[in-house]
Amino acid sequence: MERNIKLIDGTYSPDEAAEILYSVVNDKIKFHNIQINSAIERNTTDTFHSEKRLAELAVSKEKISTMLKDARDNGADLEILANIEVNIRVKESQETV
């Protein structure tokens, strides 16, 4: 089953775009930091995915900063289109022995 959600769709000033984009990225950073802290509290070492995503998100923040600077320097607005595709995946049942 597939679902599409239009999350962001519009043209924004650099300041508005910064607020929107940084909010999304910062929320994802917060989420992955919580995941890492939870794994540490559970004494598991399953933090690879979250650590990898944190590095990717840091790069994304740099890209956003560059885009915002370019828009400001050129007196331009930014068009942001963000659609989220959600796929529901039924887990296979696990047999217990």
Image: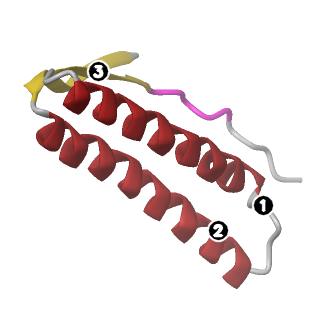
Q: Position of residue 63 (x, y in %)?
A: 47, 34
User: Dot 3 surroundings within 10 Å: few (below 14), some, or many (20 or more)?
Assistant: few
The answer to whether residue 17 is magenta is: no
Picture quarter containing residue 67? top left
Q: Would you name the residue on which mark 1 appears? A: 46
Q: Earlier in the sequence, mark 2 or mark 3?
A: 2
Q: Would you name the residue on which mark 2 appears? A: 36
Q: Which mark is residue 83?
A: 3
Amino acid beneath label 1: Asp
Secondary structure under badge 2? helix
Q: Residue at x 65, y 49 (%)?
A: 55
Gap in angstroms between the C-alphas marked 2 and 1: 8 Å
Q: Earlier in the sequence, mark 2 or mark 1?
A: 2
Q: Is 43 located above or below residue 20 in the figure?
A: below
Q: Residue at x 60, y 52 (%)?
A: 54
Look at the image and name its color scheme: secondary structure
Amino acid beneath label 2: Ile
Magenta span dominant secondary structure: loop
Secondary structure under badge 1? loop
Picture quarter containing residue 65? top left
Q: Which residues are magenta?
A: 88-92
Secondary structure under badge 3? strand
